[in-house]
Amino acid sequence: MSGTSDQIIGDLDVMQEGGKGLVFKVENNQGEVLPAFAVCFDAGYFAYINRCGHIAIPLDYMPGEFFSDDGRTIMCSTHGAEYAPDTGACLGGPCFGIGLEPLAVSAADGKLYLSSDDFCLVEAVDKADHSS
Ligand code: FES
């Protein structure tokens, strides 16, 4: 399936810089449905497939919680691999140089949009409010 541009992932105002993000699902051109997430960092918005470079499992134990305590790195909750929030590059830990797979996103009019030709949004799920 080919992706279409400008699909709404969620509202920007529920995202916290260095804090809670948005979780959603995408489908790639091979028809695989994959978990994904978006975060705010240094006033920018970044999104990735939610799959650790160490073991192919989601990074977050609590939905929408991706950052280390200091809000400077994305950290896998399972074994502590760390990634750069703005590039997805592996910074340390058991990701062994394998970074996160990025997704193109854009922000406008209070919304975050998936803007990728390679992925299609199949489920926009805002878990940022599900903090219990
Ligand atoms: S599964 Fe992510 S660090 Fe091991």
Image: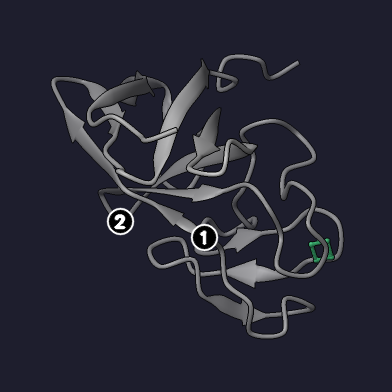
User: Where 26 falls versus 95 (above or below)?
Assistant: above
Q: Secondary structure at mark 2?
A: loop
Q: Which residue is mark 1?
A: 101
Q: Is residue 25 left or right of residue 86?
A: right
In the rendering, at what x and y percent does residue 25 appear? 57, 29
At 75% from the left and 79% from the top, the residue drawn is 93
The residue drawn where x is 71% and y is 60% is 52
Residue depicted at x 38% and y 63%: 86
From the viewer's side, name the closer residue of 48 and 45.
48
Q: Quarter of the image containing the N terminus?
A: top left
Q: Secondary structure at mark 1?
A: loop
Does the CB distance between marks 2 and 1 fall below 8 Å? Answer: no
Quadrant assignment for the C terminus: top right
The type of colouring in the image is one colour
Disc 2 to disc 1, how far (Cα)?
Answer: 19 Å
> Mark 2 or 1, which is nearer the eye?
1
Q: Could you say which quadrant of the image residue 64 lies in? A: top right
Residue 97: x and y, percent?
A: 63, 84
Q: Please, what is the three-letter code of the amino acid marked with disc 2?
A: Asp
Determine the residue positioned at 46% across, 40% down: 38
* Residue 81 vs residue 13, the one in the foreground: 81
Q: Quadrant of residue 111?
A: top left
> Which residue does the numbered mark 2 point to in the structure image?
42
Residue 101, x across and y down, in percent: 52, 60
Graded by Cα atoms within 10 Å as few (under 14), some (14 to 19) or many (20 or more), the crowding at tag 2 reads: few
Ligand 1: image quarter: bottom right
The earlier-in-sequence mark between 2 and 1 is 2
Q: Does the rendering let one see residue 23?
A: no
Disc 1 residue type (three-letter): Glu
- Residue 92's place in the image compared with 13, above or below, is below
Q: Above or below — where is 111 with respect to 74?
A: above
